[in-house]
Image: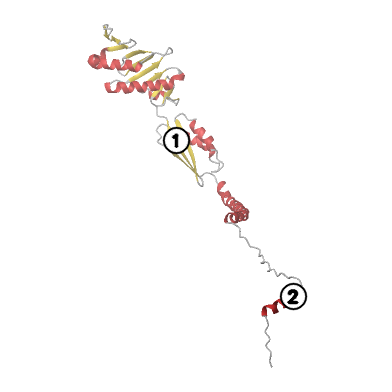
Amino acid sequence: MLGLLIRDQRAGKAAGRRNAPNRGAVRVTPAAPRKWSRLTLPSLSEARRRMQHLLWPLLLVMLGMGLYELANRLQPLAQRPISLISVEGDLQYIDRDSVHQRIEPYLNDSLLTIDLEALRADLIAMPWVAGAAVTRVWPDQLVITLDEHLPVARWGDSALLNNAGFAFAPDQVNRFEGLPLLNGPERAKRRVMQTYQQFNRLLRPYGHGVAQLELRDRGSWFLTTRDGIEMLLGQGDVVEKMQRFLTIDKLMLSERRELIARVDLRYSNGMAVAWREPATIQSGSNE
């Protein structure tokens, strides 16, 4: 007779656990990931700096070699004497032979060794030269540009004045006797020239002109017209006084102008007229 054997599986498992030998607990840890070193590329600015450090010495060497080669090529030209000097300018009074005499000591110099400032100073020292410019033209030429004094009036007996009131003393001043004669203290040349120009602008529309103008030591002005009329203007407000004379001249004196010998404008609101004839009249408040 077969018997039935029934096993409790849970009990079997439990029994198995109880009977298992105690071998200790073993913990298995996963392996740490391997770290790889990264390759970092330099930044753009850092690369540029490194490139500059490498290129600068090379560029300096190349520049030095180029300058050395250029100097060797230019040396023969630098030693070449000046072959052509051109003198330019609207010259009416400057003597070209005198200019050549000033230039002659510099003809043996080369274009690079010539002293331009010294040559310019020698040219400026000439009586008629108001300004001078000296320019190099490669490889062996000089261009000289001269500005000339334009005489406007005589200053005393031995000099002329240009329109800026600058006095210069050329030879043969007596050739310019047709110019107005101006006189005054040496320090007052420019002031006398400016006053002359003012009077000339006032007188010209009325048919008058300045023949002589003098600033005397005490500051009073004395003028002679081209008609021979002497004018005593005094010290102050000389332009206003001249305008007063022109107004009265237009109203009363224009038809008898040739008979006027002298006009005294030193009055505050009138003038006195001296005639070439013995008669003397006054106009304005002193009439």
Which residue shows up at 33% across the image and 14% down it?
A: 231
Mark 1, other Cα within 10 Å: few <14 / some 14–19 / many ≥20: many
Q: Is residue 117 toward the left or the right of residue 285 in the image?
A: right
Residue 17 to residue 66: above or below:
below
Q: Earlier in the sequence, mark 1 or mark 2?
A: 2
**Residue 63: percent from left, percent from top:** 59, 52
Question: Which residue bears the numbered disc 1?
Answer: 146
Mark 2, other Cα within 10 Å: few <14 / some 14–19 / many ≥20: few
Q: Mark 1 touching mark 2, by CB under 8 A?
A: no
**Residue 280: percent from left, percent from top:** 27, 7
Question: Which residue bears the numbered disc 2?
Answer: 18
SS state under label 2? helix
Q: Amino acid at mark 1?
A: Leu
Q: Amino acid at mark 2?
A: Arg
**Residue 226: percent from left, percent from top:** 31, 19
Could you say which is closer to the camera, residue 141 or residue 265? 265
The quarter of the picture where the C terminus appears is top left
The quarter of the picture where the N terminus appears is bottom right
Could you say which is closer to the camera, residue 244 or residue 158? 244
Distance between the alpha carbons at the discs numbered 1 and 2? 131 Å
